[in-house]
Image (cartoon, rainbow, N blue to C red):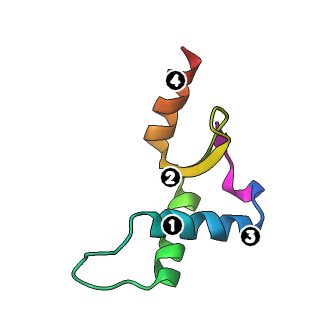
Amino acid sequence: MIIPYEQLSSDALQGLIEEFITREGTDYGIEEISLSTKVEQIKQQLKRRDIVVVFDTATETVSILSRRDAQLLEQDSAT
């Protein structure tokens, strides 16, 4: 189930974004990007609706997914 990110408190959204960013571990890119910059990048992607906040009712967890992946997940759960 897609949850509008605007419905989350600013603290909850911040925590979710930081968890999403740090979940992958070390950034091995050519140029190191600060956490605050990455947070802003994720917020912009949420505003553009490129990515969405998803609540999984089966596991009662919240995550961030691409819009396409979230839509596929919703289609699978509807069948």
Marks 2,1: beta carbons within 8 A: yes
Cα distance in 3D space between marks 4 and 2:
17 Å
Which badge, 2 or 1, comes first in the chain's sequence?
A: 1
Res 43 seen here: no
Mark 2: amino acid = Ile
Quarter of the image for the C terminus: give it: top right
Specify the segment rendered in magenta.
Answer: 1-6
Closer to the chain start, of discs 2 and 3, is 3
| Residue 75 drawn at (x, y percent) | 51, 23
Q: How far across and how far down the image is residue 53, in percent?
A: 60, 50
Residue carrying label 1: 42
Calculate the distance from the C-alpha at mark 1 to the C-alpha at mark 4. 25 Å
Q: Which residue is mark 4?
A: 75
- Residue 58 place in picture, x, y as percent: 64, 32
Q: Secondary structure at mark 4?
A: helix
Location of the N terminus by quadrant is top right
Residue sitting at x 65%, y 71%: 14
User: Label 3 vs label 4: CA separation?
Assistant: 29 Å
Q: Residues within 10 Å of mark 1 (few under 14, many from 20)?
A: many
